Amino acid sequence: MSSAPQQPKSTNIVWHPGQVTRDDRQRITGHRGCTVWFTGLSGSGKSTIAVAVEKSLWDRGVRSYILDGDNIRHGLNNDLGFSPEDRTENIRRIGEVAKLFTDGGVLNLTAFISPYRSDRDRVRSIMGEGDFIEVHVDCPVEECERRDVKGLYAKARAGKIPEFTGISAPYEAPEKPELVLETAKLSEEQSVAKVLEYLEKNGYIAKA
Amino acid sequence: MSSAPQQPKSTNIVWHPGQVTRDDRQRITGHRGCTVWFTGLSGSGKSTIAVAVEKSLWDRGVRSYILDGDNIRHGLNNDLGFSPEDRTENIRRIGEVAKLFTDGGVLNLTAFISPYRSDRDRVRSIMGEGDFIEVHVDCPVEECERRDVKGLYAKARAGKIPEFTGISAPYEAPEKPELVLETAKLSEEQSVAKVLEYLEKNGYIAKA
């Protein structure tokens, strides 16, 4: 089951290890469980790259899973909005779920703006060494706004979306990410290749 | 990615399917993602059986993952206690996480008392047809209290644990569970065999 417990609100919970370990699970799958955490502005390319990475991994027989706004905001976190407190709780829960998937041996991709450095660092801190791979999807806000594929920047400028990251709410770039993808300069294919190369070089997946 | 979205609190979230489907993932693993939801009193044998089932599955090359008090109460739900409201939110979140694992193609075992019928039924309702396998680990409270492996019943009788299921808080048995394990009558091996038989007969895993 999972690694070292944190302090829960409730007591009377006995921690006992399962019979099947994380190493055992990885022996079935042939790859390592980990979390590739994409962070960046809306429209920077996080989800697009995550989906393309998942496709490439599947072609190699590596099972991955994407956590993103689609399956999290509509489910687990459908009680949360976009206030600073709710954003922090949003990322806390996502981090805990990512930890479970990682522990379960899944190569897990997350695609959330996750604008606060402290929130991301907290996720890193609950993960085991090497389990958290922070990928800064680094695209200037001007470029994201120019693309505006979902029309959200226009809405934000019109004041229809309060607390919109990059416009009316802050984005705190990672200081020491494992990887930076400058998506205004790289093609989608180049970005995907950089992620796969990182995963190969660092032993998360076998070389193609 | 996931199946049909629920209504989120936040708007401006665009639902788009990933390129790798759940069927694709299952083609890699050779088994179906699902959630085997063990429910029953403290001490009824939920975790013991889940751990033994996981071991048997691993021996067959089927990757499973256990969600239980250990990895949930110490992590995702460490902000929740045991009031009725917190129990409901506890199960809601676990159900959403179980849905993600199921969607990710993992054979997912959950071991929580989950005392309220409405909470379990809500989890069933967010899952796809056949994804939720409710297993009532049915053991009389007298027998659970006699075993009292964790000493919790003694503490509950002494008033040291408020709202203890079966003593000072209700347990609502499932009305139409997929499986009932009468653990006062069955050995651990017999219980495990019944679960595996169910999974085989209904096409979740290949026959051994």
Image (cartoon, coloured by chain):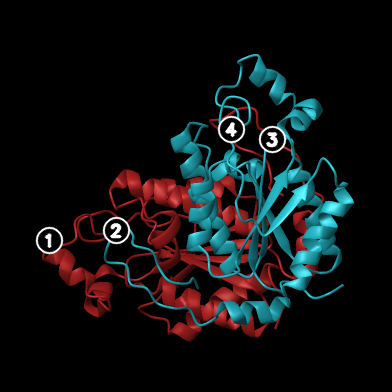
Chain colours: A cyan, B red
Work out whether mark 1 precedes mark 4 in sequence or the reverse, and give the earlier one.
4
Report helix, strand or loop for mark 1: loop
Residue A58 drawn at (x, y percent): 81, 63
Q: Chain of mark 2?
A: A
Residue tagged by mark 1? B159
Instruction: Give the number of the mark in front: 4 or 2.
Output: 2
- Answer yes or no: are tags 1 and 3 on the same subunit: no
What amino acid type should be assigned to the residue bearing mark 1?
Gly
Report helix, strand or loop for mark 3: loop
The answer for how far apart the CA atoms under marks 2 and 3 are is: 37 Å
Residue B105 drawn at (x, y percent): 69, 62
What is the number of callouts on the image?
4
In the rendering, which numbered label is found on residue A19? none
Residue tagged by mark 2? A10
Q: Quadrant of residue A27?
A: bottom right
- Answer yes or no: are tags 1 and 4 on the same subunit: yes
Q: Chain of mark 1?
A: B
Q: Quadrant of residue A140?
A: top right
In the rendering, which numbered label is found on residue B7? 4
What amino acid type should be assigned to the residue bearing mark 4?
Gln
